[in-house]
Amino acid sequence: MQREIKFRAFDDGKMIYHDQVQPILIENNNHLEQFFKTVRPNAIIMQYTGLKDRNGKDIYEDDIVYCCRYSNNELHKVVVKDIRQLPENMFGSNLNWREVVGNIHESPHLVS
């Protein structure tokens, strides 16, 4: 299965998504190249995980996600740290739903 490659950055107090910048190369619409040229060097870059929440919202690294399992209806709060090491409770056939409730940069109070 192929995963769409997308990024966002937390830069100067605001979230910037790669598809919000204008492409610099007309022939191939290279949004990613322009994105990385647009954000400052000290911006925090986050990659799309390839997963969506129950509302169809993309899940990125550093997102805070609530997950609920069919088996026990327990609610779990997950902070997505690295797409190469997604927590096990983000997947599975007994996963009822998952929902992005914020991210650690704009909503740090949700982490505790």
Image (spheres, helix red, strand yellow):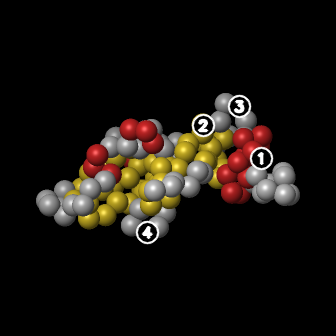
Q: Where does the image place residue 64, in percent across and percent down from the top left?
A: 41, 49
Q: Where does the image place residue 89, in percent across and percent down from the top left?
A: 27, 49
- The answer to whether residue 74 shows anywhere in this view is yes
Badges 3 and 2: C-beta atoms under 8 Å apart?
no
Badges 1 and 2: C-beta atoms under 8 Å apart?
no
Dot 2 falls on a residue whose secondary structure is strand
Q: Residues within 10 Å of mark 4 (few under 14, many from 20)?
A: few
**2 shown above or below 41:** below
- The answer to whether residue 109 shows anywhere in this view is no
Disc 1 or 2, which lies upstream in sequence? 1
Q: How far is disc 1 from disc 2 in space, using C-alphas? A: 16 Å
Dot 4 falls on a residue whose secondary structure is loop
Disc 1 or 4, which lies upstream in sequence? 1
The residue at the point 84 percent across, 51 percent down is: 24
Disc 2 or 4, which lies upstream in sequence? 2
**66 shown above or below 10:** below
Q: How far is disc 1 from disc 4 in space, using C-alphas? A: 29 Å
Tally of numbered discs: 4
Q: Name the amino acid type tagged 1.
A: Gln
Dot 1 falls on a residue whose secondary structure is helix
Q: How far is disc 3 from disc 1 in space, using C-alphas? A: 13 Å
Q: Is residue 112 left or right of residue 37?
A: left
Which residue, given by chain and number where applicable, does mark 3 sit on?
41
Q: Is residue 17 left or right of residue 34?
A: left
Q: Name the amino acid type tagged 3.
A: Pro
Give the mark toward the camera: 1 or 4.
1
The residue at the point 55 percent across, 45 percent down is: 47
Q: Where does the image place residue 4, in percent across and percent down from the top left?
A: 56, 55
Tag of residue 55: 4
Q: Name the amino acid type tagged 4.
A: Asn
